[in-house]
Amino acid sequence: MNILIVHAHPEPQSFCTAMMNRMKIRFEQQGHTVTVSDLYAKRFNPVASADDFVERSNPDYLVYALEQRHAQKTNSLPADIAEELKLLEQCDLLILNFPLYWFSLPAILKGWIDRVFLSGVVYGGRNFYDRGLMKGKQAWVTFTLGGREHMFGENAIHGDLNTLLRPVLRGSLGYAGFDVLEPFAAYHVPYITQEARVAILDQLDNAIDTLQSRAKVPYPSLDNFDTQMNPLVK
Amino acid sequence: MNILIVHAHPEPQSFCTAMMNRMKIRFEQQGHTVTVSDLYAKRFNPVASADDFVERSNPDYLVYALEQRHAQKTNSLPADIAEELKLLEQCDLLILNFPLYWFSLPAILKGWIDRVFLSGVVYGGRNFYDRGLMKGKQAWVTFTLGGREHMFGENAIHGDLNTLLRPVLRGSLGYAGFDVLEPFAAYHVPYITQEARVAILDQLDNAIDTLQSRAKVPYPSLDNFDTQMNPLVK
């Protein structure tokens, strides 16, 4: 497999970065090719704006998705988006590796999705969810967080973690058609012992070794909806 | 009331911008003071990074939240964060106005939260949810989206909209202690008639006029959890 790890932590010595390095080593040991896109190291620009388009199809009014399509057709995507998009298209498995900020992605990674998940290439028209254009690829979300495991779940203080992650798991990766693997969460990271950190990295190795039997996050199939996206079976 | 509208649309002629302008006029007619923080106009930097701290408490290892606290204490916050934080502290009602990107905030607005929701000022220690430090303030989320209303809900293709917005409504605004008002969604905006747009702006006026009786988005009370955040009643 070609594996793309999109990594977004501001501290190169962080445990989150250690997770990225560990994944790279383990996957390479298994014969896979791993590319890391380190967004902080690249000083990636996460802001989707008019600046992304040198030559607009409509110079008077910006519709970002339409200009994405135009730029793609006219081969005039900005170099940074073109580079990330190429990595995305080449990969079989996309991994987003990050620290959870406000129960979601750090802005630099959210903007990677905003700018790189191109209309017409990643999704578009009726090509979303199980007809998304990334179909056949897998996606995996691996992250660190401050909270403890018992703070997440049905009756726990923060609620169900996959529900909190829904905009990413289902609304972005699922929408684009990826097979979305059950996330890997490293809990309580800022507060734990070195021993506990080592144990998490071992769990990560184990998750990698068993990745192809890992549970998938469910998302809708367009088969169950009509052309207006009304449910076919009530 | 002092009202802060944080606005994040890349096209100044957009309907989303029209919503911002309409809110400003209506609230001002009612005698309120409205400040608009237009993130695209300001070219706001959404990336939480080491660059935010000129003089670090720990120069060797970045823990963003700890450096936020240190910078706040030593009065060395970057000018842009200090400015936004002052607006936030002065407001009675915070409005986030934006186009929904990937079922969540555009990166420029996500980064406004990442950088401006300061540890020790907005939340911290056990000061979160109903003990968050923004307690006594209200927050309202107003946004445009491409989807139609029937695509959201329990059995609809995209699921419940407030669940998708949970990281913002509950995980950010609720976590910080705001009273979170039921969001205002402008559906299907890129595809609707001028007439339909006028109707939405009228609904927005009406929502403003009845804002103080608007439903609130529920979130946990720490009263129901012990010091380890285990639920007190099972």
Image (cartoon, coloured by chain):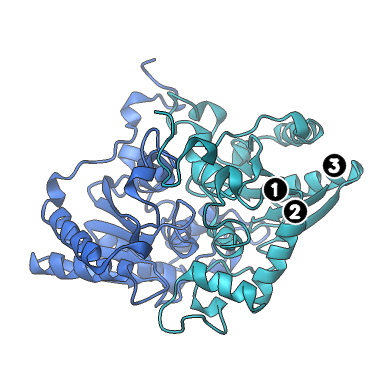
Chain colours: A blue, B cyan
Q: Amino acid at mark 3?
A: Arg
- Which mark lies nearer to you, 3 or 2? 2
Q: Chain of mark 2?
A: B
State the residue position of label 1: B95
Residue B134 location (% of width, % of height): 66, 51
Q: Is B10 left or right of B167, judged from the image as shown?
A: right
**Circles 1 and 2 on the same subunit:** yes
Up the image or down, A4 lies above or below B96; here it is: below
* Distance of label 3 from label 1 (alpha carbons): 14 Å
- Label 2 near label 1: C-beta < 8 Å? yes
Residue B34 location (% of width, % of height): 82, 52
Label 2 crowd bin: few (<14), some (14–19), many (20+), radius 10 Å:
many
Instruction: Identify the mark nearer the N-term, 3 or 2.
Output: 2
State the residue position of label 3: B26
Q: Amino acid at mark 1?
A: Ile
| Viewer-proximal residue among A150 and B46 | A150
Instruction: Identify the mark nearer the N-term, 3 or 1.
Output: 3
| Viewer-proximal residue among A148 and B179 | A148
Up the image or down, A78 lies above or below A224; here it is: below
**Circles 3 and 2 on the same subunit:** yes
Residue at image point 85% right, 42% down: B26
Q: Amino acid at mark 2?
A: Leu
Total tally of numbered discs in the picture: 3
Residue at image point 44% right, 40% down: A157
Q: Can residue B154 be seen from the camera position used here?
A: yes
* Distance of label 3 from label 2 (alpha carbons): 14 Å
- Label 2 near label 3: C-beta < 8 Å? no
Q: Can residue B41 be seen from the camera position used here?
A: no
**Circles 3 and 1 on the same subunit:** yes
Looking at the rendered image, the quarter that the C terminus of chain A falls into is top left
